[in-house]
Image: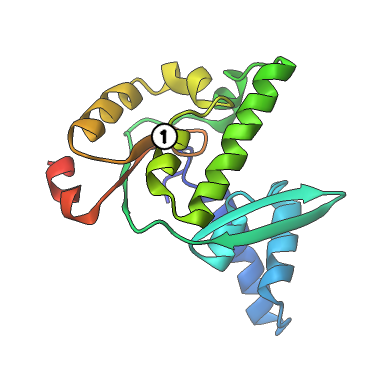
Amino acid sequence: IPVTHGLGSSSSAIVAGIELANRLHHLNLSAEKKVEIASQLEGHPDNVAPAILGGLVVGTSVNDHFTAVEAPLPPFDFVAYIPNYNLPTSEARHALPRELKYQQATHASAIANTLVATIFAKRYLEMAELIEADEFHEQYRASLVPELTTIRKISHDNGALATYLSGAGPTVMTLIKHEQTEKFIA
């Protein structure tokens, strides 16, 4: 997993360490306990939970307790464009505003919440629209990943559902039907 590319390399290292300790010391940790420990170390379950549970996972923390819920994986290919340059998370975080106006924050939260609902309801066309409507980070980080706009246009021209910035970037991820993947990559 390339480091500083928005693909969860730090989370994967944490999960690997937990699994090594689990096996070497015969701890018999449940998946839920592994998620809890990994989330405490990472500070959030965003990448550690799917690394442990597999697939698509939605999660957060409340009162120092981490909750992760497995979601149905959409039946599409996830095609990653991984640039040959690094984008340190600290630099990507620096591009974010320190505050959002209340109206923008509530609207951005509604988009994110509805996105999760469309995944569980398997309403993929609406899901795709919501993926590209992010108001929390992508618009602020887009200038750090100039390929995003071009790849999004190419993906739409080739029938892809959605293109988005993976994590803090610079990896750009595209959801596309399996039968259209080869043409899109070419």
Q: Position of residue 91 (x, y in %)?
A: 56, 23
- Left or right of 184? Residue 176 is right
Identify the image quadrant of residue 71.
Answer: bottom right
Against 68, residue 85 (above or below) is above
- Residue beneath the point at 25% across and 26% down: 153
- Left or right of 64? Residue 68 is left
Q: Which quadrant is the C terminus positioned in?
A: top left
Q: Position of residue 62 (x, y in %)?
A: 82, 48
Q: Position of residue 114 (x, y in %)?
A: 57, 41
Under tag 1, what secondary structure? helix
- Left or right of 73? Residue 105 is right
Identify the image quadrant of residue 12.
Answer: bottom right
Query: What residue sits right under mark 1 in the picture?
Result: 129
Tell how many labels. 1
Against 13, residue 87 (above or below) is above
From where the camera sits, is residue 1 visible?
A: yes
Residue type at numbered disc 1:
Glu
From where the camera sits, is residue 99 visible?
A: no
Residues packed near mark 1 inside 10 Å, few (<14), some (14 to 19) or many (20 plus): some
Q: Position of residue 120 (x, y in %)?
A: 53, 56
- Residue beneath the point at 74% across and 69% down: 33
